[in-house]
Amino acid sequence: MTLAAAFDSARSSLAASGVQSSVISRNVGSANQPGYSRKIAGLATFPNNGVYVASIQRAASAGLFANVLVATSGSAGKNALFDGLQKIASAVVEDPELGQSPTAQLNKLKQALQQYSNAPDNVMLAQGAVTAAKDMATALNHATQIVQATRESADSEMAASVANINQLLIQFDTVNSAVVKGTVAGDDVTDYLDQRDGIISKLSQEIGVQVAIRRNGDAALYTDSGLTLFDKKARTVSFARTTTYSATLTGNPVFIDGVAVTGSASVMPLKGGKIAGLAELRDKAAVIYQDQLDEIARGLISAFRESDQSLVPTLPDVPGLFTYAGAPAMPPSATVLAGLAGTIKVAASVDPALAGNPSLLRDGAISGAAAYGYNAAGNPGFSARLHQLVDEMDLSQPFDPAAQAKTSASVIDFASSSASWIESERQTTNADVQHQDTLLERSNAALSNVNGVNMDDEMSLMLQVERTYAASSKLITAIDGMMKDLLAAVQPA
């Protein structure tokens, strides 16, 4: 090897060491930066001699990153569902104000009726029974408000999520274009790749997402159900928010490029992400619980109905203590009447606050028709009707299977099964949340082991680079000395 060749080799080594040192410093400085992947200087040799940095790459694993995306979407979806169930359960079932749940109010009503039946001439006990009935109706009204407010909140969060997705897709388009252009030009695009992965990670919190990497680093995005989210350009994600909810209202679906991805009409429903969890809460879990509340209300109207007391009954049964907008007709048996729990109320004719007579609870004819009177003689000690009402609360009646609680039970037992249902849903979802969070934690740890910055490794590599740099410097110094000696030897005396 000539001195010139040796000099070129040493000089290239110094240059490569400088780039390596810069990459290591970059890693050390960004070690705690979220989403940063360790950068690696890839060395190559010149045809004749010497080395150079051929490329700057980053430590990454497409498989592990895909696992993180799936775990992130799963965790976000289950957490959104659990938060909604928790809101409903804590406000309705757990009795934050001491016994305001439907089951607790039913038992209070039964107790008040039993006390009144023991002293049917006691006006104060009659008023107490009516008050318990009003509290029962209020509890169902309040529970309906909580459920519908939860659905409205979920709808609002879905709208915010859709807006965030569209904004992230715009950012993704910009960064993805920079990756493609940089890759074609041979530039260092590792920071852009980190940015792109960060955007995809944020997207996975909102919606289940899959990534396909193509020529020149170009990336395409798909939902976890296979629908295109980004391919050369962003697809439009749209959603029409519903600002006020009622039990009879169905929320709007989320669309991607005109295709519904939430709701019963969706042919490619989302599996993960916040939107999927919110849609399940808004369109399924909360709706089922509302159905159960409505069936409790229907069961109450049925249990307290009044029948024709004529010797030859010809008139149909009518609502008694509890009534609703459809009176005097009885609600259909074993059929959910959407929104009934939100409108059920105590008949004005027995409510003292509305100039009503609470003794009608004992005597009957609450609806106003004499044929429905039970105490024809006007006996103040008459208690048969009150005992009958207490018994009716314990008698089994049919309930709509769509409510997913007991299909044949007393109204109290049905209410208890409803409370058990939502508690079971909450516990199951909480277990899912813990599982998904653990999976996400482990997936992130596995990916971090691959692309994370280890300070000990970086310092060790820095020492190697410094030794290489020192050796190259000594070689250049030696060549310089040899060149001086050679020049001195050929110069004339």
Image (spheres, helix red, strand yellow):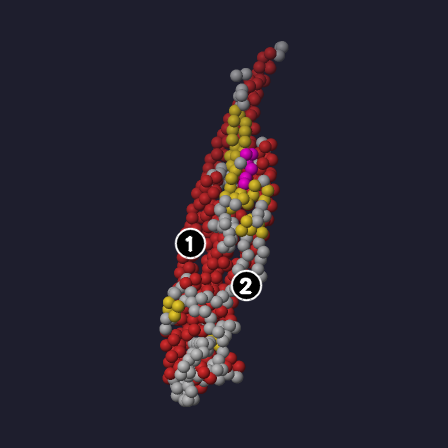
| Helix, strand or loop status at disc 1 | helix
Q: Residue at x 59, y 42 (%)?
A: 233
Tell me, for residue 273, which label it has, or none.
Answer: none
Q: Indicate the amino acid at tag 2.
A: Tyr
x%, y% of residue 24?
Answer: 52, 36
Check residue 66 for magenta coloring: no
Check residue 216 for magenta coloring: yes
| Residue position marked by numbered label 1 in the rendering | 432
Res. 156 image quadrant: bottom right
For the residue pair 369 and 312, the one nearer the viewer reads as 312
Q: Residue at x 49, y 55 (%)?
A: 264
Residue 57, relative to residue 334: is it above or below? above
Residue 303, relative to residue 156: is it above or below? below
Q: Residue at x 37, y 67 (%)?
A: 408
Residue farthest right in this picture: 492
Tell me, for residue 245, which label it has, or none.
Answer: 2
Res. 106 image quadrant: bottom left
For the residue pair 193 and 469, the one nearer the viewer reads as 193
Residue farthest top in this picture: 492
